[in-house]
Image (cartoon, rainbow, N blue to C red):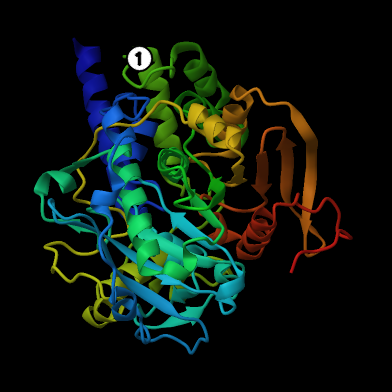
């Protein structure tokens, strides 16, 4: 009895530690819903593997509404504190369910030569994290937020150099996206998110008809390892049902992606041990006593004890980039700049700057956001979605289906991420049992090794990005942009410094 009480108290304490860590460091693209389930032994996420026939046979025509005049209304004149730029920006809402009053918020950045470049959708994961917060404002968007929380500066390695970029806050309850039906916000899941994302795209393309036949790519990171392939599967399915190309999908690319639950867990603890974060004995105990083949499986006390030690050992660092500094606890937005004299590529307090900026009324007005005056503050990861009701144990069958339909698939991995590390992704790809076309090799950018790559038969490329954390474009913006260029061009990453560089 005494041991059980001790274990219960230890679990409660460690759960509090996990929660406080999330609160301190925000979520970096992995939301509380998934991270708690990834780190702890128990899970409220179910294991539904397939979309129901009701979603397969959905009459999409009923959900595609008139978009007349809305593009003009969505045009952003200028964001507060924004430097001058030559490209166009748009922001606004697309209704995905009139009956429920459900609408998703988007931010769209055209390339300067927009007519000649493809359309690229970026999704962040969580589930429940905002593509405007991370993708747009901290990773591949054209601007980043100064430490004053009021002004913006240019990201010179933004991906709108190579594509027209669409950032989507999804599902409802994320960022500025909303629903007038309370149950939509309190509970969501993979199936609903995929169909809402598809309905959003079909309506958005009606609003921006010049992109209707444009080459289209879906990209994202983290739990978008679910969202991106699931949306691709929906597009392919409904293209087939319609007997025409509704959306001209050419490729998908996912980074540090949640793909396969069992290998995500095993690979994470292997990475922690191999990088000196946890002792070998704890890894051995996890490998001996833990069974990650099903989220719902009760684990032994020996497994629980080992995982609790692993959590306690890694809590003092930022697992999203194991070598990065932490943002100090402070109400002063400029405190980090004052306290830290070391030069860093990415400011660990960026979440705080973005939160301050996005909650300004003048910013929301410029973005055409928060038109319904939602009752809670905008957050990078949703604090109102309480339940995630369906999440497949593995996305591998969907990836294989997408690849079999001729869609190019790239998976990339920042090699300093400790949440969904390179060891997890390599294990997941190994389970796909694909023949190797181009063996493992270093790829180059600016005469340096940008990472390593391997190409598989059947439309799959795997690439690491050297020195990047969970949000690859934040930590290694030049290498991330190079990765995007080669992905969109459909060519292998360069295998020597003298290789012809794509411009």
Image point (80%, 35%), residue name? 439
User: Is residue 453 or residue 188 the one in the foreground?
Assistant: 188
Residue wearing tag 1? 299
Q: Please give left or right for residue 475 compared with residue 486 in the image.
A: left
User: Is residue 304 or residue 180 the one in the foreground?
Assistant: 180
Residue 171 % position (x, y): 28, 50
Q: Please give left or right for residue 433 compared with residue 36 in the image.
A: right
The count of marks equals 1
Q: Please give left or right for residue 227 compared with residue 448 in the image.
A: left
Q: Quadrant of residue 336?
A: bottom left
Mark 1 crowdedness (10 Å alpha carbons): few <14, some 14-19, many ≥20 = some
Residue 490 % position (x, y): 70, 52
Image point (29%, 35%), residue name? 55
Residue 45 shows in this picture = no
Most extreme residue toward the front, as rendered? 243
Residue 383 shows in this picture = yes
Helix or strand or loop: what does disc 1 sit on?
loop
């Amino acid at each position: 009895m005494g041991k059980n009480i001790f274990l219960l108290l230890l679990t409660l304490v460690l759960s509090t530690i996990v929660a406080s860590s999330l609160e301190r460091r925000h979520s970096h693209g992995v939301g509380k819903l998934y991270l708690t389930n990834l780190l702890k032994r128990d899970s409220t996420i179910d294991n539904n593997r397939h979309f129901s026939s009701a979603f397969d046979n959905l009459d999409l025509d009923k959900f595609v509404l008139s978009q007349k005049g809305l593009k003009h209304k969505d045009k952003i004149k200028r964001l507060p504190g924004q430097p001058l730029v030559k490209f166009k920006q748009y922001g606004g809402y697309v209704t995905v369910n009139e009956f429920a009053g459900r609408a998703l918020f988007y931010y769209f950045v055209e390339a300067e030569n927009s007519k000649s470049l493809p359309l690229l959708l970026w999704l962040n994961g969580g589930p429940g994290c905002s593509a405007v917060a991370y993708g747009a404002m901290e990773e591949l968007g054209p601007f980043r937020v100064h430490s004053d929380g009021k002004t913006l500066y240019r990201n010179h390695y933004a991906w709108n150099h190579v594509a027209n970029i669409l950032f989507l806050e999804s599902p409802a309850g994320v960022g500025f996206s909303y629903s007038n039906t309370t149950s939509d916000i309190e509970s969501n899941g993979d199936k609903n998110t995929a169909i809402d994302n598809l309905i959003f795209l079909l309506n958005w393309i009606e609003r921006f008809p010049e992109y209707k036949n444009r080459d289209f790519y879906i990209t994202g990171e983290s739990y978008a390892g679910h969202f991106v392939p699931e949306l691709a599967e929906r597009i392919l399915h409904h293209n087939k049902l319609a007997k025409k190309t509704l959306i001209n999908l050419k490729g998908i690319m996912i980074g540090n992606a949640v793909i396969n639950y069992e290998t995500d867990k095993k690979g994470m603890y292997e990475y922690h041990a191999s990088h000196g974060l946890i002792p070998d004995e704890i890894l051995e105990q996890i490998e001996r006593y833990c069974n990650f083949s099903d989220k719902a499986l009760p684990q032994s006390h020996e497994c629980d004890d080992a995982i609790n030690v692993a959590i306690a050992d890694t809590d003092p660092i930022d697992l999203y980039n194991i070598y990065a500094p932490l943002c100090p606890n402070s109400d002063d937005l400029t405190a980090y700049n004052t306290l830290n004299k070391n030069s860093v590529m990415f400011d660990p307090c960026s979440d705080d700057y973005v939160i301050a900026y996005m909650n300004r009324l003048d910013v929301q007005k410029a973005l055409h956001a928060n038109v319904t005056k939602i009752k809670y503050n905008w957050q990078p990861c949703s604090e109102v979605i309480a339940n995630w009701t369906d999440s497949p144990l593995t996305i591998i069958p969907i990836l294989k289906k997408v690849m079999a339909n001729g869609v190019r698939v790239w998976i990339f991995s920042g090699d300093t991420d400790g949440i969904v590390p390179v060891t997890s992704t390599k294990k997941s790809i190994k389970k796909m049992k694909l023949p190797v076309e181009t063996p493992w090799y270093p790829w180059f950018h600016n005469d340096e090794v940008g990472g390593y790559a391997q190409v598989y038969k059947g439309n799959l490329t795997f690439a690491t990005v050297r020195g990047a954390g969970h949000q690859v474009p934040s930590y290694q913006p030049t290498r991330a942009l190079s990765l995007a260029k080669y992905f969109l061009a459909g060519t292998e990453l360069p295998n020597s410094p003298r290789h012809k560089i794509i411009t």
